[in-house]
Image (spheres, grey):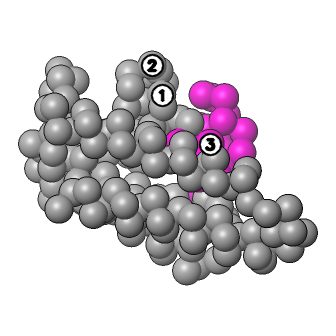
Amino acid sequence: MEALTSSDSTSLNYLTHAGRMVLSGLSKLNQQDVRQFQQAYDILVNFINEPANRERLELEMALVGINHINFTDVFYEFVLLSLLEGKTSLPTSRPGTFFYLLMEVIMRIRPPGGAWTESAGNFYLLIKDQMKAWLDSIFNLDESIYESPQRLSWQVMVNLEMQVDFLLSSLD
């Protein structure tokens, strides 16, 4: 599947690993079973990475108004700002679909009843702040960087890595 930010396999691997680590931390802070989260996360990632699922994924995302499959729209806007905050709910889904697998992941991050622990709530706010800082950093780059897609892609990933490193260090 095309990358959430690029088709570079190194970037994809980084995004996958970083997402796993950050969301595992959130799951742990919410006193959830991290192994169950990681299993659900890995199943979801495998589904996303399977080319045969691309069309189904695009159709499901279109149902919730996401017409471009990319990191910012899917993770930041849909998962982080909508699902985890309870502002939207997923359409009814059946086993093996993207939404079903995504709900399996979400259920292993949020505690039953949705009452987050204080530390998980604080970390969630930190995740949102770091994602916003990352987006701001993209729009505040030197104009010359925008002239080269390779330089822009590299700088976007460098800035994302800084935000993720900060998040992971705050879990220690």
Give the residue furthest to the right.
147
Image quarter hosting the C terminus: bottom left
Marks 2 and 1 sit apart, C-alpha to C-alpha, by 5 Å
Of callouts 3 and 2, the N-terminal one = 3
> To which residue does mark 2 refer?
87
Marks 3 and 2 sit apart, C-alpha to C-alpha, by 15 Å
Q: Nearer the viewer, residue 21 or 155?
A: 155
In which quarter of the view is residue 102 placed? top left
* 43 relative to 66 in the view: left or right: left
Q: Amino acid at mark 1?
A: Ser
Residue 155: x %, y % from top left: 67, 70
* Residue located at (54% from left, 48% from top): 133
> To which residue does mark 3 refer?
73
Range of residues picked out in magenta: 53-76
Residue 47: x %, y % from top left: 47, 59
Q: Nearer the viewer, residue 35 or 118?
A: 118
Of callouts 1 and 3, the N-terminal one = 3
Marks 2 and 1 close (CB-CB < 8 Å): yes
* Residue located at (22% from left, 24% from top): 114
* Residue located at (73% from left, 50% from top): 139
Q: Nearer the viewer, residue 56 or 106?
A: 106
Residue 113 covered by magenta stretch: no
Label placed on residue 82: 1
- Count of numbered marks: 3
